[in-house]
Image: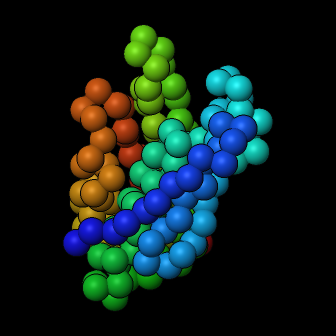
Amino acid sequence: MSVEITGTYIGAKKVQLVHGPSGEVLITEAPKDNGGEGKSFSPTDLVAAAFGSCVMTTIAIVAERSSLSVEGMHMRVEKHMQSEPRRIGNIPLEVHLPESLTEQDRRKLERAGLACPVHKSLHPEVKAEITFVYDVR
């Protein structure tokens, strides 16, 4: 399966991305430390956001198949850059899930989250640790 995404440089260190199947538009820009205005996601911000979103989406798919509720699930991800070479060095992710899940269901959903395609696609030198917290009521 393939998905086409097109991009156009629109000036001021900004790129307009168009999702082919839906036509949805997203603007990225250089981060402030590289001369951007900081008014939109940078490309590396999107990597961190994709990581968190992918983990939650994968968990939601498995939860639905297993008739489990993950209502209220949310996440927090941080992106830490490094230099020499400039790249993402660490993207710790915290996923908050319902406290009512059983130990067996928690293990099942954690395995699903750890298997998300974005997590599996990250370079091995990028520290992408996931912490699961069961505090959603």
Q: Nearer the viewer, residue 41 or 132?
A: 41
Q: Where 91 falls versus 18 (above or below)?
A: above
Which residue is located at x 43 percent, y 78 percent?
21
Residue 103 appears in the rendering: no
Which residue is located at x 71 percent, y 26 percent?
35
Q: Is residue 120 left or right of residue 16?
A: left
Which residue is located at x 42 percent, y 51 percent?
51
Picture coordinates of residue 92, whole percent (x, y): 46, 38
Instruction: Give the number of marks.
Output: 0
Residue 62 appears in the rendering: yes
Q: Nearer the viewer, residue 118 or 128?
A: 118
Q: Is residue 108 left or right of residue 38?
A: left
Picture coordinates of residue 85, whole percent (x, y): 40, 16
The N terminus sits in image quarter: bottom left
Q: Where 101 falls versus 125 (above or below)?
A: below
Question: Picture quarter containing residue 104?
Answer: bottom left
Picture coordinates of residue 83, whole percent (x, y): 48, 14
Question: Picture quarter containing residue 127?
Answer: top left
The C terminus sits in image quarter: bottom right
